[in-house]
Image (cartoon, rainbow, N blue to C red):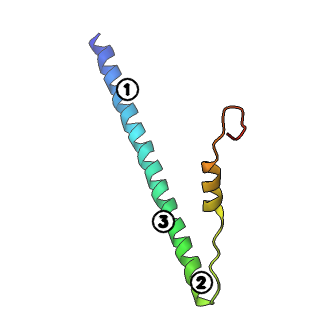
Amino acid sequence: MRTLATIALWLLTLLGMSLGIVAGVVALASLLTETAARLAVTGTDRFARRHRLAPFTSGLPDELAAVLSTHRDGKGDPR
């Protein structure tokens, strides 16, 4: 019985450490992605100002807001 408890605790410890490593990798990937996106936006703004171009802005935020503001019932029909 004591051996079974020791094995169970060891497995739980291993599972906890593994999940911690996975969570850390996901957090690091998220941080790197956000940093790359911010650098890309900064680079395009500088390029547009340097060459006196109108910065390109996609309508994605407006389109997303329009989609999210549309209420639909379970059948897919607008209310």
Q: Which one is earlier in the sequence, the residue at label 1 or at label 3?
A: 1
Give the alpha-carbon distance from disc 2 to disc 3, as whole Å. 18 Å
Q: Label 1 crowding class (10 Å Cα cut-off): few <14, some 14-19, many 20+?
A: few
Task: Indicate whether 76 appears above or below 39.
Answer: above
The extreme bottom residue here reads: 51
State the residue at coordinates (70%, 41%). 78
Describe the element under mark 3 as helix, strand or loop.
helix
Q: How many marks?
A: 3
Q: Label 3, on which residue?
A: 35
Mark 2: few, some, or many residues within 10 Å (few <14, many ≥20)?
few
Quadrant containing the C terminus in the rendered view: top right
Tell me the residue that label 2 is attached to.
Answer: 47
Which residue shows up at 44% across the image and 51% down it?
A: 27
Quadrant of the image occupied by residue 48: bottom right
Q: Say which of marks 2 and 3 sits in front.
A: 2
Q: CA distance from mark 1 to mark 3?
A: 36 Å
- Asked if labels 1 and 2 touch by Cβ distance under 8 angstroms, the answer is no
Q: Residue 63 location in percent, x, y? A: 66, 58
Against 9, residue 23 (above or below) is below
Q: Residue 56 location in percent, x, y?
A: 65, 75
Most extreme residue toward the top is 1
Residue 55 image position (x, y, % from top left): 62, 79
Q: What amino acid does circle 3 point to?
A: Thr
24 and 46: which one is in front? 46
What residue is rendered at 54% in x and 66% in y? 37
Which tag is nearer the camera, tag 1 or tag 3?
A: 3
Instruction: Where is residue 73? Give x, y as percent.
Output: 66, 35
Q: Given contact means CB atoms under 8 Å apart, are the residues at marks 2 and 3 in contact? A: no
Residue that carries the numbered disc 1 in the rendered image: 11
Give the residue type that dot 2 points to.
Phe
Residue type indicated by callout 1? Leu
Mark 2 or 1, closer to the camera:
2
